Amino acid sequence: MKRQNLDSKWRFRFLDESYSQHIPLPSSLLPLPMLLRLSHEDFVHVDLPHDFSIIQKRDPNTPAGASNGFFPGGVGIYEKVIYVPEEWKGKKVMLEFEGVYMNASVYLNNQLVTRHPYGYTSFHCDLTPYLMYGQDNIIRVIVNNSALPNTRWYSGSGIYRHVWLMIGESVHITPWGVYVTTPKVSHDSSIVCIRTTVENITDKSQDITIRSTLMDGDNVVAKDDVKLSVPPRGTAETQQELTVSNAKLWSIENPYLYTLRSEVIKDEEVIDSAETSVGIRSISIDPQKGFCLNDVPIKLRGGCVHHDCGLLGAAAYDRAEERKVELLKANGFNAVRCAHNPPSPAFLDACDRLGMLVIDEAFDCWRESKKPNDYSLYFEDWWQKDLASMVLRDRNHPCVIMWSTGNEIIERDGRSDGYAYARKLADFIRSLDNTRPITNALCGLWDDTAVRMLKAKLGDLPEDYDVWGEVTKEFVEPLDVVGYNYLLGRYQSDGEKFPGRIICGTESFPMQVFDIWNTIENLPYVIGDFVWTALDYLGEAGIGYVWYKDGKGFPKPGEYPWHQAYCGDIDICGFKRPQSYYRDCVWGIAKKPYIAVYKPERYGKEFEISWWGWPDVVSSWTWPGFEGKPTKVDVYSTDAEVELVLNGKSLGRKPVGKANRYMASFEVVYEPGTLEAVGYDEKGRETSRTILKTAGKPAAIRLTPDRRVLKAKFGDLSYVTVEVVDAEGNVVHNADTNIYFTASGVGSILAVGNGNPVSEEMYVGNQRKVYYGRAMVVVRANGEPGNIVLSASAEGIPTAQVVIEVK
């Protein structure tokens, strides 16, 4: 089917609170007569992807509370006019929505086409029966995210991913109708197996040819034609095999992609076509070798990632999704777990191109709820449709190495038919794709239900009875890999208790990374670790807190204005946090020591730190007003020894490296100047050096785009790092300067932000304070060639400018 992007020029409006409070869930949204009374003046023009939560002011009284980062929800109405020509008669016309959060109702010409409750799966709408030819047709989408709380993290609201118009001839390849597998993989000779499903919407049987052509750039690698008869008003499937000599295998280091061109040919004319990226690779798992990619054992250096795009909220711009993967790769990750729902197609496309392994996850809950209005309301009626959406849409991605049926499912102890559903979901996935292992992420038990069930069955239990192991045993039987969330203590013992079990650490605490990785390296049946989290995110506000008991510093965990989780290795802007530098040491990729300074004003103060947190440190030696005051400095390093030097005077050498958990601590009295960490190898030779300098007063604003050249298409982005620096170019970490931004030319400011997890500032607008001297501006191209000029100004500092070319 031909695909046309429908992101531009929608009309949008919020539904008044007086209406939304009367709207029941999950089905009926708003009486159609009321919709018809809305005039065009009630709407504003927007382009997709669009998140209507991120543009609203956070509310300390929102029912969603800290879980959703105190962002409101609501009901939004989207409208778009499309012209339907007469020549579309006899064709199939559909819409594909990549993601709408949540409870979407789609109308065409005031007729209800479909409803889709789950906010994270893609879905199709057949417009054909409702089209009016030779005239304008009105698409209306009502999005109802008013029933809060319905999620444990920031969801966003609205049509937050792409929308596509799909037009197919009377005989066409169905959406997601091309399925590619690679049953034989080697450099010498590989086999690419292709199953193609074709639909016939006519009243007569149609005889066609399916041509499958594998391309390497412009070169034909292999081609095959097969004849197929498609019944009237029905579908048919064909299977083909292509042999590829001298195959270039897809891997993390070399994510090589071929292109498969699928064509429907009738009477020697191509009447329909589709293109699919193909990565030739094999995956396997076993308790002795662990996880293998192309027969090479690999430990998964993984991180969990939510669907939001940080400063953009949930809006899934292609570049924003690609940048996530770039950040992960740059910081040593080779795998990502999509928590806890299918990601955007753009994210998986980027993982394919850049070489990132993916666990594709379906649900955070089944029948049992975690929030009053969550997916549990729909699970029984929708789980098959939503699982099918995930698997059929994503099964051609070489990056996807595992399917996950859920996260911390309450039914893991067998309650509410949990064992039966665990098998149902796994078997259903295998019916759609049997080429990947299936997992589910299990944590400890949250209540005593399992104990009571066991006692009713067995009587009194011995003191050392393994309740978790016994009650989850049947739940995990259908799985190929058992996901362990925060269960490091079971890795060794469960390998002995459950021989043959393959374990993956699907969530882990950041501060346990040394022990986790040391354990994983010695246990082949534990295939990897996924920290919570790789990238920070909105919602679950403050779970990575450090809270001082004197009440100063951050507010109490979960209290307004907390809105970021504050637990990511990489912060919400993409800036590397201290725990990421420590992880570099554990993973053996650190290049030089990292200096982590405890804030002098907090020295000696009693504090609490979350399991998901990290000590309250910053890599800065600018602490005006604390001259002569003591503080503590940690140095993270892979070197045998590290020396700390203050203004040329040695403060001593200490052993570091793996034997000392890659960390050495020093007590230091603050004095302005330079603080240096010098690394030495086992023979006492200097290997590397890190220097912190005391910054002077703010003297300039430094603007650094991640991309200075954008494509002339709407929605291409440049992330501009904003730094307040002194006269020598040192970042002034103690600055909290408010900076005003303007953009002129062929683009605009899409978002502003910083890493402050408790700021009340909004992520839309033209101003933002720096946090630890830094902020970020996201600039969006409007689709025309030319230049975008971004200007930044602040009181008492010269205005700075940067030019971004669009071509």
Image (cartoon, rainbow, N blue to C red):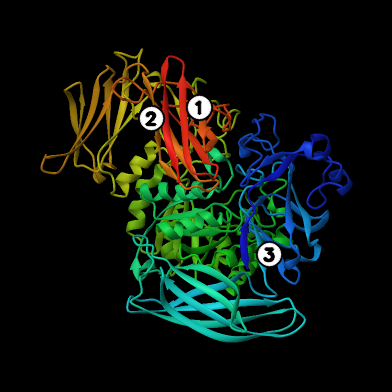
Give the percent coordinates (x, y) of residue 365.
64, 54
Residue labelled with disc 2 = 617
Question: Residues under labels 2 and 3: Cα distance?
Answer: 47 Å
**Eye-nearest disc, 2 or 3:** 3
Q: Quadrant of residue 774?
A: top left
Q: Quadrant of residue 226?
A: bottom right
Instruction: Report x, y in % for residue 270.
Output: 59, 77
Q: Which of the two marks, 1 or 2, is nearer to us in this view? A: 1
Q: Is residue 96 above or below residue 170?
A: above
Residue 396 lies left or right of residue 579; in this view the side is: right
Type of the residue with mark 1 = Phe
User: Within 10 Å of the Cα at label 2, are there few (<14), some (14-19), or many (20+) other Cα atoms?
Assistant: some
Label 1: which residue? Answer: 741
Mark 3, residue position: 385
Q: Nearer the viewer, residue 158 or 258?
A: 258
* Residue 252: image tag: none
Q: Which badge, 1 or 3, comes first in the chain's sequence?
A: 3
